[in-house]
Amino acid sequence: LLLITLSVQFSINNFKINADLTGLVEQTGQWRTNLDQVNAAFPDQSNLLVVITSPNMNQTQLAVEKLQSTFSTASLFTDVFATSSLPFIKQQMLGFMTKAEFNHFEQQFQRYIPDIIASQNQLPQYLASLAANLKQASSEEEQLLLVAPLKQLIETGEVNWPALLQPDDQSPSVQVISLMAKPQLDTKEPNKLIMETVQALITEANLPTSVKVRLTGQTALDYDEIVDANDSVGIAGAVSLFSLMIILTIGIKSARIIMASYISVMIGLIFTIALGLAIVGSFNTISIVFLVIFIGLGVDFAIHLSLHIYEQRVKGYDNQQSLIKSLQHSITPLGLCAISSAIGFMSFYPTAYKGLGELGVISAVGMFVGLVVTFVVIPLFFQFFGYPSIKKHDLKPNNISNKLANVLAKNAIKTVLFCVFLGITSSFIASQFRFDFSTLVLKNKASESVQTLEYLQQQKLGSSYQLLAVADSQQQALNWQQSLSQLPEVATSLSANDLIAKSLKIRQQQLQQLIMTKTQTSLPPLSIEDLLTWGVQVKLAPRVIAVLTALENIPTLLIEDGLFAPVQQQLAVFEEAGSTTFSLASMPNELRKRFITENNEWLVSITPAGDMRNVTELDNFIQAVQNIAPLATGRAVAEQEVGKTIIRAFYQAIITAIIGIIIVLFFAIKRKLDIILIFVPLLLTATVTIAIAHSFGQSLNMANIIVIPLIFGLGVDNGIHIVQRFRKEKSIKRFFASSTPKATLFSCLTTIATFAALMLADHQGMYSIGFLLTIALTLILLFSLLVLPALLHLFSGNTKAHTTEDSSD
């Protein structure tokens, strides 16, 4: 109780999860040097992106400027940057519009501005032009568009010309603010303060409901992943404990064994969490899975020991004798199971994949903690609360066990042939498996940060998998961009060249031409009353009449100030932009330094066009870009190279696990042929698991790649129990009449249930581990209880005698 109290207190004070997967794999080589050089020349000034969308450009721009001002007041942020807020960019906004956006702008400009200029800021002259335009309008919608400035004037007191001129019937306008803030590394959730501060400041800005603000970037991705990991482990843990109760209740039907097993697992889990934190310092979003893994594996020790104690009591031994015999029998096989499981978990520890190495260390410690706790807690529980009562039906022979033993004995040769066929078929399918090196596939697809990241790529505004290439000169950057624009794998490329609007002067001239088509209007001036009377006579649309009626209640001076003054301000902006020369020389330093170094090196940012969750498309994108810019680098290249390291670690881990387990079995198993027989179900499980996963479209990734070495580490447990009990009983019938098959069945079922609970996780890395382990443990159960006993019977050396003996018993 004292140890439990201390462990809980230590865990509460020191529990921490690290979501940064980049440090989980050793990163060396030329690619790492190249990436570091690019990052040094163009340091990333942001770890959080605020994505703002609204129906039109003007509203989005106003929201960006308001948020930028709000963020700048917070000392937490060391850098707040929005390209669109720079005067250098704002003055060129006309030139940055797409062709469709400018066509809409030009149409709106032509609808309103020339008539206002021609009226020389006189309301009667403007109303005369309005009447002429209304008379020519071909539809009610066109009439409503013509009086839209007056309607806005009535509602707000002035006309927001940028909002009227810019499109709101196209796709939403999108802009981005980049923020830089240092995570609070000394806290349990390093990014929580950043996220909460940003959310609070967004709320404080009180933006219109039509403006949508979303967060992405590394900070948001890490934060969401930790939240998903915590939630997923909580849900999976609760479901696994509930499943454990159901399976034990149905299969064992002993309240004392169930309670003893539960208490043993929970105490072992408490100790393992504390020891894990003490050893590795913090969990990561992969190693945290051990919480569920321990529940599934820790209960195996308790089930095997408890059922063996129960079996001895059924045979007639008293409590103390049953306990002593069970401890003597179980210490070796359970100890070997703990060692073999630990080897499976630790197989990644010597490799470059330190993330799974940490999971291995924690889980290996957990295996030995679970073993010790089992041999302490189970006897103590039975001593304090009584031993399990003997059920009458357990005193009778089990007909199902007899029938299964006879079937397997008669079909042993067919079993061998089946294993050969299954092994060859599954190996062929498994050889086609692929490794998905993307860290994006580990995250929750439904999280805001992931969805916003994908949205940015769809809008061709960037991607976490964009590549960065450094050109020696402006001309080389231009040449690269020209070549990149021809590639189907590339959505866009961006350099300092693209920050100078090429079509600005031409578009300004087009608008100036529209103004010059109208000089001072020669139409007779109209008063508001005359315009309204005329409107009723010609039967203008009722909603247009309502606008003109409301206009009568506003003084003429206020109408002129609200209608004409903003136009003059807008034209002044155009004139200032038209008289300004935009060039690299006039580019502000805060923008220039993000694209051009002091040595005149040019950064070209290349956004992919394909689905970066698809490894094939990502590989094609990298290869296509590097054919043009050989040293192009970025997250995509880093993950590709890390993926190669993980693949090497994967094969190294499998070899380590197999060699380690063979050594253990060599000293533990008397008949060396049994070692080969134990590996038959394991090899079958490994190949069939990968084959099934491949058939379901699943791939190996950074998280679930540990499953294959674990198949050998966990699957050998059943082999040890079965071989040792089979050799002790000396016949297949007596083996199936013992407690070992039942213990194997229910320990596997409880483990399968706990691993299957991981499939409820939103965190895709946990889900994939649960998916593969559920398949693998199911296959291990089937092959261990059906294939291995048949092989042991066939290669026992006295098959006929055993069969005869079985028939006569």
Image (cartoon, helix red, strand yellow):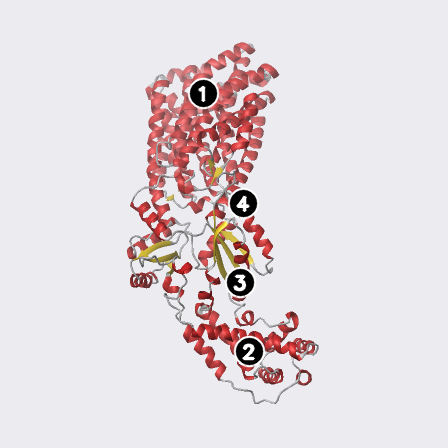
Marks 4 & 2, CB-CB < 8 Å contact:
no
The picture places residue 364, in percent across and down from the top left corner, at 43, 27
Mark drawn on residue 334: 1
Q: How far apart are marks 1 and 2 (CA)?
A: 86 Å
**Label 1 element class:** helix
Report the residue marked by disc 2.
112
Q: Is residue 807 above or below residue 228?
A: above
The residue labelled by disc 3 is 60
Query: Is 316 on the left-hand or right-hand side of 545?
Result: left
Question: Tag 4: residue type?
Answer: Leu
Between discs 2 and 3, the one toward the N terminus: 3
Instruction: Report the Cα–Cα distance between label 3 and label 4.
Output: 26 Å
Q: In this view, does 547 lie above or below 40?
A: below
Marks 4 and 1 sit apart, C-alpha to C-alpha, by 46 Å
Q: Which amino acid does label 1 sit on?
A: Leu
Label 4 CA crowd tier, 10 Å (few <14, some 14–19, many 20+)? some
